[in-house]
């Protein structure tokens, strides 16, 4: 397994991509403390509006979902 496949490396790479588009990746830390997997959401920096990961419930996007959304954004599809 290469280093680029570790979650921490993926998250740093995704944060850089999101930053180029004025987005911030949010992580639900409270869920992790309770022993449940923490979800993610994308927030627009200027308006503080959640643009992805809040449907059907807050922080419902997985790391893979966020990565797929950012890849579409990079390709101009989102």
Image: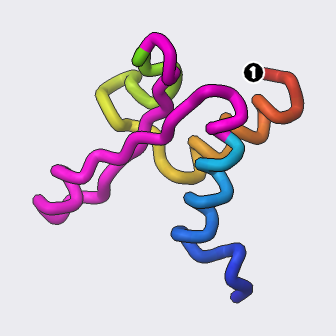
Residue sitting at the far front: 46
Vertical arrangement, residue 19 with respect to residue 78, above or below: below
* Span shown in magenta: 18-47
Query: Which residue lies at the image location 76% right of the left edge and 29% below the top edge?
Result: 73
Query: Which residue lies at the image location 42% right of the left edge and 15% below the top edge?
Result: 49
Drawn side of residue 50 relative to residue 64, left or right? left
Tell me where residue 2 appears, x and y as whole percent.
73, 85
**In magenta segment, residue 16:** no
Residue sitting at the far left: 34
Tell me where residue 42 appears, x and y as whole percent.
49, 32
Which of the 4 quarters of the picture holds residue 48? top left
Drawn side of residue 56 relative to residue 70, left or right? left
Drawn side of residue 45 relative to residue 76, left or right? left
| Residue beneath disc 1 | 78
Query: Which residue lies at the image location 70% right of the left edge and 88% below the top edge?
Result: 1
Q: Quadrant of the C terminus?
A: top right
């Amino acid at each position: 397994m290469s280093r680029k496949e570790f979650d921490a490396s993926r998250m740093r790479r995704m944060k850089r991509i999101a930053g180029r588009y004025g987005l911030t990746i949010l992580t639900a830390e409270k869920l992790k403390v309770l022993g449940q997997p923490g979800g993610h959401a994308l927030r627009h920096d200027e308006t503080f509006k959640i643009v992805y990961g809040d449907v059907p419930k807050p922080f419902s996007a997985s790391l893979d979902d966020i990565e797929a959304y950012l890849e579409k954004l990079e390709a101009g599809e989102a």
